Amino acid sequence: MGKPADRPEGEDPVTTSSRTWTALLATVLVVGVLMRIHNLLHYPVLWGFDAPENWAYIQHLLESWRLPAPDEGWATSHPPLFYYLAAGLVRLLGRPDPAVAVQAVRLIGSAAGLATVALGVALVRNARPHDRLRMTLAAGSLLFLPAQILMSAMLSEELLAACFASCAIFGCAWTLSRAEASSRVGLEPLAIGVAAGLATLTKLSGVIVIGAIVAAYAVDGLRRGALRAAAGRVILVSLAACLVAGWFYAHNWLSYGYLYPQDLPLHRIMQTMPPGERHAADYFSLPAATWTDPQLLNPDLLRSVWGSTYATVWFDGHRHFLPREDLATRRAGTALLLLALLPTAAFAVGLGRGVRRWIREPGGPDGPLLLLVGLSLLGYVAFTWHNPWFATLKGTYLLGISVPFAFYASEALASWLRAGRLRGALVAVPLVALVVGVSALFSFGLVVEKSELPGLVWRSDLRLRSPIP
């Protein structure tokens, strides 16, 4: 018997045919896209986080392109890019019926979410071009992430901001992965800066990706002894980002005396939400209610920052998609959140491997990815500390780290699946169960019906009213 042909580096050793993984990747993509189409068609048009208020901002722009004052409406304090794009789309469509217009605008977020998935897969392909198993895992880790699915159905800027941030961090990781990165400064940093600026013009959290990219280029230049090239990249990225987004924050400063509004009288109702204060212990508690009763008003979960965040990354902790009091749904949530420990652990393990690689030698994608994750988590801690209300604990605020999540979780999961038939099965079975469970629960109304209004009832005298019947 002849010697088997050598496999290309990174080729999946357990597959019988590359077509198998290609077909599986295509199936994962088709199912993920069909879920989003189903939700766009069936999720009520103005349900979701701040959807009526976001639509009110868009309606203002349909009447006038004037940039409103931060306190003119609930959402008018936000950076304006998403709202102007939405209003432009509605005008382009000839101002259809409002319900149709909202559905069209929600396509922006859904398409942005799918683009982020593509970036996660592309980064894995750049690092391991023959590893179709890992590409499939990277795609599935985002396509079947409940936080991403929920936002794909809602009228929100969240996924658009995450997409721009992902474009910027992908570009930075890609440039640092090339051998000539240490000595040459091309036009890529300008494009990266534009993407980071667009993220910041969509959501303030975009400044985090700017900081991560600047730090990644600076550290890489120091380690390689290529300070001039690093300085050139830092200047180009910063200049492009400031030109794209800086005007909005400068306008706020010159017109209202602050870069970004905080605690406007219009938002005072937020300050009546529980718990109302934050303690250091809130960042170290992880109660059993995270799994047994994953809704954020549970007394044990109310103060747990990371428990609440976990319940909103892998489930509907705010109950905008699923019924509040349904026992079967709660039990399904328990199952999903237990199964989700596997990809969450894989992400942590992958991060650890990335840290070791980055310490050993410069170059590669790890620097910007790790810096983005670290700065994003620090930013989230600072934000939740200064805004101590249950409504601000949302895993969706961390969607900016989607590409690092796909990259690192897929790395660990792929290695575990290849660790032998038995160990591979112990990983594959819960992953398949997680995908099936997410697909069933988060295809709106397909298996679980939600009849009450969205959200948790934290004050009995509040009633949700929608501008669109």
Image (cartoon, rainbow, N blue to C red):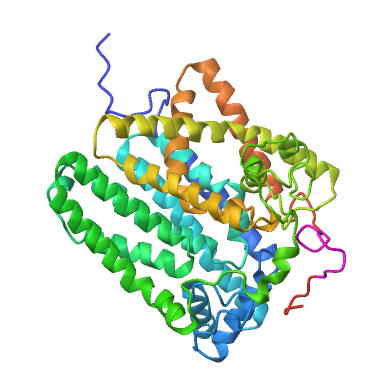
Q: Quadrant of residue 210?
A: bottom left
Image position of 369 (left or right of 361)? right
**Which of 274 and 448 lies nearest the eye of the viewer?**
274
Please indicate, yes or no, whether residue 325 appears anywhere in the rendered image: yes
As displayed, is residue 241 above or below residue 301?
A: below
Residue 280 position in % (x across, y down): 62, 43
Please indicate, yes or no, whether residue 23 appears anywhere in the rendered image: no
Does 7 appear in magenta? Answer: no
As displayed, is residue 40 above or below residue 425?
A: below
As displayed, is residue 91 above or below residue 80?
A: below
**Which of 321 and 318 lies nearest the eye of the viewer?**
318
- Quarter containing the C terminus: bottom right
Residue 462 position in % (x across, y down): 83, 69
Magenta-colored segment: predominant secondary structure: loop
- Quarter containing the N terminus: top left
Image position of 205 (left or right of 122)? right
As displayed, is residue 237 above or below residue 343?
A: below
Which residues are the magenta region?
451-463
Residue 220 position in % (x across, y down): 23, 44
Does 452 appear in magenta? Answer: yes
Residue extending farthest right: 460
**Which of 130 and 337 lies nearest the eye of the viewer?**
337
Residue extending farthest top: 1
